[in-house]
Image: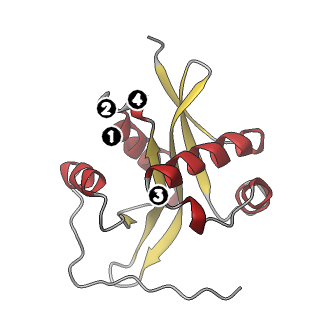
Amino acid sequence: MDEIKIRKATVEDAAVVHSLLAALEASLGATSKITRKQEDLEKFGFSDDPWFEALIAWRGAEPVGLVVYFREFSTWRGSPGVYVQDFYVSEAARRLGLGSRLMDAVFEHTRDWGVRYCRLTVHSDNRGAQAFYRRLGFKHAEDECTFMLDKR
């Protein structure tokens, strides 16, 4: 079995990011909700002033994991943080410690941002992901409730 390597995604990886996000969405049964196109990822993730960054885990030439993240700031903490938007490990690469390695890589890649914390949301029915994040030390924010407003 090939060693798994993690590296920052580049514009040349936009199709891979798109396909890994599609795999994540399929695993959540959310494909009908998606309006994103690969061109959106290229425009907003790989410009001179990107809205997000991504790390891809590779086993040889096969992409097996993805994390998409961006900066945020907590006025309560008075410190910068990182928000993990999407986190995916393929079935074939699960139970190999890759999830922990990907999260460590996020903190490594955001070190120059001065990151002091990480936030993310998990689908309420995704018990496996919730258990995984708890094992990493994440705590459920009981006093928060996520709201969304679509301005399209």
**Left or right of residue 104, residue 13 in this image:** right
Q: Residue at x 42, y 49 (%)?
A: 107
Front position among marks 3 and 4: 3
The tag earlier along the polypeptide, 4 or 1, is: 4
Question: In the picture, which quadrant includes the N terminus?
Answer: top left
Q: Secondary structure at mark 1?
A: helix
Tell me the CA gap for discs 2 and 3. 25 Å
**Whole-percent x and y of residue 70?**
55, 62
7 to 143, vertically: above or below? above
Q: Quadrant of residue 39?
A: bottom right
Front position among marks 2 and 3: 3
**Whole-percent x and y of residue 149?**
56, 88
Q: Residue at x 31, y 32 (%)?
A: 97
The residue carrying mark 4 is 93
The residue carrying mark 1 is 100
Asked if one can make out residue 87 in the rendered structure from this viewpoint, the answer is: yes
Crowding near pointer 4: few (<14 within 10 Å), some, many (20+)?
Answer: some
Tell me the CA gap for discs 2 and 1. 6 Å
51 to 97, vertically: above or below? below
Q: Are marks 4 and 1 in contact (CB under 8 Å)?
A: no
Tell me the CA gap for discs 4 and 1. 12 Å
